[in-house]
Image (spheres, helix red, strand yellow):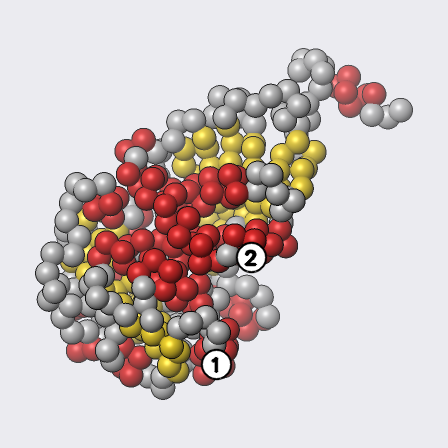
Amino acid sequence: MTLTPSDKALVPFVSVDHMMQLAHHIGLERMIVQMVDYLEQDFKRWALFDKTPRVASHSAEGVIELMPTSDGEVYGFKYVNGHPKNTKEGLQTVTAFGLLADVYTGYPVLLTEMTLLTAIRTAATSAMAAKYLAPKSAKTMAMIGNGAQSEFQCLAMKAVCGIEEVRFYDIDKNATAKAARNLSSSGLRVVSCSSAQEAIEGAQIITTCTADKQYATILTDNMIGSGVHINAIGGDCPGKTELHKDILLRSDIFVEFPPQTRIEGELQQLAEDHPVTELWQVIAGEAKGRVSGEQITLFDSVGFAIEDFSALRLVREAIKGTEYFMTLDLLADPDDPRDLFGMFTRAAS
């Protein structure tokens, strides 16, 4: 990724509008499938990456986080917030932006919005996990929590796992109506349900994605039978869970990065030495995923920086030869690298 002199001072920037145009240009389901490919590539080389739990600044209102990683040649990070109270104020719960940089020079090579991109990469990660962990015959999913992520999750399961029916439930009926309306022409059979219990009836894949920052029990133990796969993606910070502890005790649990998941995920409820399998090990063929029809598999997903790195790599490649970005004069780059002040002085004239 060595930069040429003409590239050094101008950084490609993908705005929200450009990201939407790019996704429409590629096709959302096709983009999700492509992102799964990028994710699998990076999960298979997991050992190469710098790995650290995200740097979080918590407040009573929410959390602001930085998520950095590097494979030794490219560095990436994402800034992201999580503020559940924002919805009531007409604001997004999650906003984000991200950056890639060349490790050799330290120069940034991509700056992009990541609110939309995070929704797509989160859905792709869920679908990738289900690809390896869910029953191969799965055709029906339950979507518990019908906020901003829900439609992306459903389309990802359709594109990657072949899901044909989605059963929606949210305590906010307007959210369920919104999700059902948005997917009315998606090719999925959409069923709106009046309870979480009704939603999971007949579902082989169950995804929970609720927003409230609290210890919650969205699914109770008696609701979960054998042979299902659960994507628990709503519990993603300390003090926030969705599943009853007994479900975890009956499940084989798969995670991204244990030091982070034990702090932020459903694993908060269990002993620090409770056994888990890292998802990258399954994808790399170093560990087993689903091994029986009776098994309950649980992907306790909190999001990890390597997933954002994969998404940023995809965008950097996808924008080449397109008009779906602009260049920013982001870097001071004087002709003489020792004469920054001279460049500043000449700007006066």
Q: What amino acid type should be assigned to the residue bearing mark 1?
A: Ala
Position of 274 compared to 18: left or right?
left
Q: Quick one: quadrant of the C terminus?
A: top right
Q: Residue at x 47, y 76 (%)?
A: 184
Residue 24 numbered tag: 2
Q: Where is residue 287 in the image (x, y as percent from the top left)?
A: 15, 45
Task: State whether residue 346 is above or below residue 233.
Answer: above
Residue farthest to the bottom? Answer: 194
* Earlier sequence position, callout 1 versus callout 2: 2
Task: State whether residue 71 is above or below residue 230.
Answer: above
Q: What amino acid type should be assigned to the residue bearing mark 2?
A: His
Q: Where is residue 290 in the image (x, y as percent from the top left)?
A: 16, 56
The image quarter containing residue 216 is bottom left
Mark 1 lies on residue: 177
Residue 164 can be seen in this image = yes
Q: Where is residue 261 in the image (x, y as percent from the top left)?
A: 29, 51
Residue 262 can be seen in this image = no
Q: Is mark 1 on a helix, strand or loop?
A: helix
Q: Which residue is drawn at 52% across and 52% down?
A: 26
Task: State whether residue 336 is above or below residue 140.
Answer: above
